[in-house]
Image (cartoon, rainbow, N blue to C red):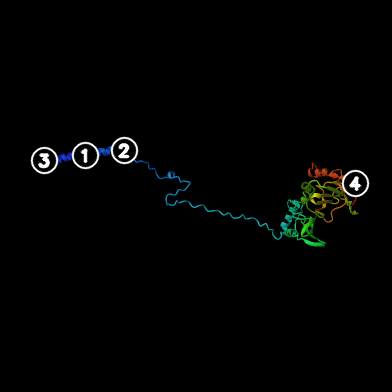
Amino acid sequence: MYRITCYCLLFLLFLGLSGCTSRLVATTATLSPSIQPSTTLLPFTPTHLPTCATTPQTTGLIPTLTSPPPPTLTLLPTQTANPTRPAMLDHQHYVQYLQQLLLDNGGECSSPCFWEIIPDQTTLGEAQDFFAYLGRPLVRTFTQGDKAFYGSILGLGNGLVVSVVLKVQNELISDVDARISLVNYRGPSLPREWLAYSPETLLLQYGVPSRVMVGLPTYPTDPASSDPGRHYYLTMFFDSENLIVEYRQKRGTSNPYYVCPLTDQFDGIRLWFGVSPEHPPSGGVSLEEATFLTIEQFYELLTHPAETPCFYLKLESLSLD
């Protein structure tokens, strides 16, 4: 009897445990679908990296790691040519430089100048350095009271010769006397190699001249030649600029009474720079007396030529110098 009772109790216990298990499984099966992650996990790619704040934040005592500042770039000074001239030009560069000086007078000056020499501003030492650079150093020729005279002669090798005389007072160049000789010139007549001193260039640069003088000097006639030795000279004065320039026509090249200053061939050009030049030109008659032009008409004719700018001289008004 006892044994039967025990079997009955075990059977009832088995039935109870089976029911609990079934309910647990059912409950688990019912709850499983509702258990989901609260956030979605994305794959690690660069597009999902966090954005860095522009202003670094410090949390507690943990130091914020920041990138080191970029290195400061130190710019080295630009390398430029040494402004100091070489001691002396070689012959080839001397010729090229002299040709350029005759074309542009060494560039523009704040006041009339010959090459780089400005009267009453340029020192003797500066002038000596300039001519030494050309390889034609200044030579002291003579002294007269408180005035000293220095000179140099330069040439292109084609018969064009430039002679320069500087008057020095108190270590300053006070006057410049420059002569361009074309007597034996074998270069082209046009374009002029001395364009910087051609009449139209100076007129355009300095304006209407204060006065213009014209003359007809004469020389002994060569019996073996039909050349009468006559030629004209033309002198322009720019008083406010302390500049005088004179042109002497080459003898026997054209009619001396028909003047074409922009195309005529000249034996020489002479320029005086300074307040009190030594041996300034004299003689001749005024342009108005020697021609049918006024100073203003002369200026317009040479600076705005419609054709070859030429004019006739009045023979009866000219005296032979």
Tell me which label, 3 or 4, sits earlier in the chain. Answer: 3
Q: Where is mark 1, residue-wise?
A: 20
Mark 3 highlights which residue?
A: 5
Q: Position of residue 1 (x, y in %)?
A: 8, 41
> Distance between the Cα atoms at labels 3 and 1?
23 Å
Q: Report, in whole angstroms, how far the alpha carbon at label 3 lies from the one at label 4.
A: 175 Å
Nearest to N terminus: mark 1 or mark 4: 1
| Residue lying at the far left of the rendered structure | 1
**Label 1 neighbour load within 10 Å: few <14, some 14-19, many 20+:** few
- Residue receiving disc 2: 34
Helix, strand or loop at mark 3: helix
Report helix, strand or loop for mark 1. helix
Nearer-the-camera pick, 293 or 252? 293
User: What type is the residue that disc 3 sits on?
Assistant: Thr
Q: Going from the N terminus, do you reach mark 2 or mark 1 first? A: 1
- Disc with the residue nearer the chain's start (2 vs 3): 3
